[in-house]
């Protein structure tokens, strides 16, 4: 026993010395989920490679550090219900089974969204918008089928995603164009009928913006006034080095909580790259493109420091409001997996997640784990 301990200490010291500052090695006793404790669930979005048999590196990391998972793509309508009379549950089943067999809380993402929408869903065979009655029937059938399949296995659903724009008005999505505002209460009603025990969430990005904040508050009130279930608001949390303003983000958390719902940080990441301004002509010059993709080899220490400090500040904000926050989920496992490498420009090298390309925790994550472990009473 003693020998094993000494041997493992020597191994970790050697490994730590071999690691660069980008590769933060930590002792195998430390885990993010222990650091978070029972404050809130700590989750991660997984892609289909990670939940398939074979990716044990990712799976071990998930099991060690996280308490919750969500599918990054495989439950979206175009994936799970690609044709009117055909569902494909294979990947979603894999993710749910991985979660259940490892004691992880599974969230469903997402039932109604204008993006990654199955192309057939809102149109007839001639490509014209279907009637309100047909769309209601399709929504009901889709929501019933998907939610009932995972009844008792999925704790809660992102029922509607990204329906409110920055000025607080409704996005002119096909759902809105055909059903008006009513499509949201209907979606929540169908989801509740399908699994009365499931939690139901409204999920959106840019939630720090005042107009959207007010629009979402109005939506919560409407749902509640009509006696519909809404358990939490998901604040996606796709951040950058210069946005959002932490105070505005906190204001939104408090505004939603004041309406009697919980708050979830559902898609947390922070791009370390220069923010691409909307409307910028990124095809302009090679020099401009290079300026927007400056860290192709590694993240300079100076940038890494700012990134880690900012991430830690947000994490501390979540801890400060642990009474209203029920889950914080990273939108991807390692930097290599992040959608940010391809958005809003394809092929950049970004560093937005909690674990780096070598599956090692970022410095602020390492710090959180070490601080929490130092606070533990000696056994
Ligand atoms: O991370 C997802 C990426 O792999 C997909 O290509 C993309 C398609 O729109 O969706 C990404 O996830 C989105 C999430 O489902 C909803 N909020 C915004 C996320 C980033 O676009």
Image (cartoon, rainbow, N blue to C red):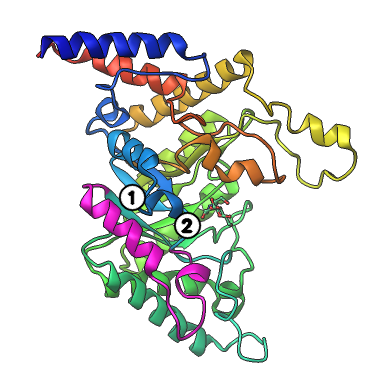
Reading the image, the residue beneath label 1 is 261
Which label is found at residue 28? none
Expressed as whole percent of the image width and height from the top left, the position of residue 294 reads 73, 27
Q: Nearer the viewer, residue 269 or 164?
A: 269
The image shows a total of numbered marks equal to: 2
Task: Examine the rendering and report whether any part of residue 367 can be seen.
Answer: yes
Q: Is residue 9 left or right of residue 242?
A: left
Expressed as whole percent of the image width and height from the top left, the position of residue 184 reads 46, 69
| The quadrant where residue 144 appears | bottom left
Q: Is residue 24 left or right of residue 371?
A: right
Expressed as whole percent of the image width and height from the top left, the position of residue 244 reads 58, 34
Q: Is residue 284 left or right of residue 244?
A: right
Q: CA distance from mark 1 to mark 2?
A: 13 Å
Q: Residue at x 31, y 13 (%)?
A: 11
**The residue tagged with tag 2: helix, strand or loop?**
helix
Q: Residue at x 51, y 14 (%)?
A: 21
Q: Nearer the viewer, residue 262 or 128?
A: 128
Q: Nearer the viewer, residue 182 or 21?
A: 21
**Residue at the farthest right position:** 285
Q: Is residue 192 above or below residue 28?
A: below
| The quadrant where residue 176 appears | bottom right
| The quadrant where residue 265 appears | top left
Image quarter of the N terminus: top left
Expressed as whole percent of the image width and height from the top left, the position of residue 194 reads 28, 74
Q: Residues within 10 Å of mark 1 (few under 14, many from 20)?
A: some
Reading the image, the residue beneath label 2 is 218
Q: Residue at x 40, y 63 (%)?
A: 91
Q: Is residue 83 above or below residue 216?
A: below
Magenta stretch holds residue 85: yes
Q: Is residue 351 above or below residue 101?
A: above
| Labelled pair 1, 2 in contact (Cβ < 8 Å) | no
> Which contiguous range is marked in magenta?
75-104
């Amino acid at each position: 026993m003693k020998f094993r301990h000494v041997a493992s200490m020597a191994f970790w010291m050697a490994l730590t010395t071999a690691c660069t500052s980008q590769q933060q090695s930590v002792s195998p006793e430390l885990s993010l989920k222990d650091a978070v404790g029972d404050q809130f669930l700590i989750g991660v979005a997984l892609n289909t490679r990670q939940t398939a048999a074979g990716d044990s590196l990712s799976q071990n990391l998930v099991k060690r550090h996280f308490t919750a998972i969500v599918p990054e793509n495989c439950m979206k309508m175009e994936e799970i219900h690609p044709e009117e009379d055909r569902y494909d549950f294979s990947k979603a089943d894999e993710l749910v089974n991985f979660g259940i067999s490892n004691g992880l809380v599974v969230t469903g993402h997402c039932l109604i969204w204008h993006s990654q929408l199955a192309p057939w869903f809102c149109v007839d065979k001639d490509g014209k918008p279907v009637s309100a009655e047909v769309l209601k029937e399709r929504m009901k059938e889709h929501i019933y089928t998907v939610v009932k399949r995972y009844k008792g296995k999925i704790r809660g659903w992102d029922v509607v995603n990204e329906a409110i724009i920055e000025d607080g008005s409704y996005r002119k999505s096909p759902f809105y164009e055909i059903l008006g505002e009513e499509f949201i209460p209907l979606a929540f009603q169908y989801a509740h009928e399908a699994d009365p025990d499931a939690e139901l969430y409204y999920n959106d990005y840019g939630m720090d913006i005042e107009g959207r904040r007010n629009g979402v508050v109005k939506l919560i009130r409407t749902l509640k006034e009509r006696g519909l279930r809404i358990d939490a608001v998901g604040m996606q949390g796709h951040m950058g080095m210069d946005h959002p303003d932490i105070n505005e983000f906190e204001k939104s958390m408090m505004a939603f909580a004041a309406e009697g719902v919980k708050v979830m940080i559902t898609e947390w990441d922070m791009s370390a790259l220069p923010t691409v301004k909307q409307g910028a002509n990124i095809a302009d010059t090679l020099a401009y493109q290079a300026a927007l993709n400056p860290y192709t080899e590694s993240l300079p220490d100076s940038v890494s420091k700012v990134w880690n400090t900012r991430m830690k500040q947000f994490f501390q904000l979540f801890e400060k409001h642990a009474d209203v926050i029920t889950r914080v989920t990273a939108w991807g496992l390692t930097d290599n997996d992040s959608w940010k490498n391809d958005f809003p420009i394809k092929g950049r090298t970004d560093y937005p997640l909690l674990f780096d390309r070598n599956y090692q925790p970022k410095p602020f994550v390492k710090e959180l784990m070490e601080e929490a472990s130092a606070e533990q009473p000696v056994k």
